[in-house]
Image (cartoon, helix red, strand yellow):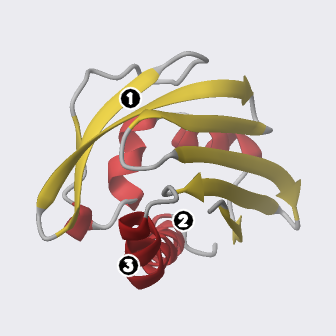
């Protein structure tokens, strides 16, 4: 069943600073919880582009590795970018990252649509674990971004 998570965070930085940080694929490591054992498997450019494929492994459950391949599908510099799963643990993963100058900083909005599938195992895993794990990942990201970009 399709799920949606929307999260907004204000950062005390300029729009160019925010864009530079989030448009650098290697920074994804900085905002992913260490317990996910997130490892990027391919060489990445300093700045993302439409069509960029990012291959990584994660270990979100019982240290079992999952391969994941996402593609940066749409970019409007300093406004938004979208990544979508091409191969991985979800039936569907569509993640929008929106940026807007606001109150002498940047309002960043994430909109995530995901579907873990309709199997009985998928529904059980979703209700018991996956939905909570995704919320924890975004909570960690919020905390980490607050540390990286403290109020000035």
Helix, strand or loop under label 1: strand
**Marks 2 and 1 in Cβ contact (< 8 Å):** no
**Marks 3 and 2 in Cβ contact (< 8 Å):** no
Helix, strand or loop under label 2: loop
**Marks 1 and 3 in Cβ contact (< 8 Å):** no
Helix, strand or loop under label 3: helix
The mark that comes first in sequence, 2 or 1, is: 1
The mark that comes first in sequence, 1 or 3, is: 1
The quarter of the displayed image where residue 129 is located:
bottom left
* In-front residue for pair 6/150: 6
**Is residue 148 left or right of 95 when viewed as pictured?**
left
Local crowd size for mark 2, using a 10 Å CA cut-off: few (<14), some (14–19), many (≥20): few
Local crowd size for mark 1, using a 10 Å CA cut-off: few (<14), some (14–19), many (≥20): many
Residue at horizontal 41 percent and vertical 59 percent from the top: 31
Q: From the image, tell me which residue sits under label 2.
A: 149
- Report, in whole angstroms, how far the alpha carbon at label 1 lies from the one at label 3: 25 Å
Q: From the image, tell me which residue sits under label 3.
A: 129
Residue at horizontal 68 percent and vertical 48 percent from the top: 97
- Report, in whole angstroms, how far the alpha carbon at label 3 lies from the one at label 2: 30 Å
Q: From the image, tell me which residue sits under label 1.
A: 54
* In-front residue for pair 44/123: 123
- Report, in whole angstroms, how far the alpha carbon at label 2 lies from the one at label 1: 25 Å
Q: Position of residue 94 (x, y in %)?
A: 62, 44
The mark that comes first in sequence, 3 or 2, is: 3
Q: Position of residue 78 (x, y in %)?
A: 76, 36
Mark 1 or mark 3, whichever is nearer to me: 3
Residue 10: image tag? none
């Amino acid at each position: 069943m399709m799920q949606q998570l929307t999260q907004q965070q204000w950062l005390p930085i300029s729009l160019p600073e925010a864009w530079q940080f989030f448009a650098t694929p290697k920074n994804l490591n900085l905002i992913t919880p260490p317990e996910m054992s997130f490892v990027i498997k391919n060489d990445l450019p300093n700045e993302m582009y439409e069509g960029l494929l990012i291959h990584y492994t994660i270990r979100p459950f019982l240290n079992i590795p999952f391969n994941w391949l996402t593609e940066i599908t749409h970019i409007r510099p300093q406004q938004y970018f979208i990544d979508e799963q091409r191969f991985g643990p979800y039936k569907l993963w569509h993640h929008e990252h929106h940026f807007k100058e606001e109150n002498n900083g940047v309002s960043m909005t994430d909109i995530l649509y995901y579907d873990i599938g309709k199997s009985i195992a998928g529904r059980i895993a979703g209700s018991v674990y996956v939905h909570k794990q995704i919320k924890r990942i975004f909570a960690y990201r919020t905390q980490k971004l607050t540390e990286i970009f403290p109020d000035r």
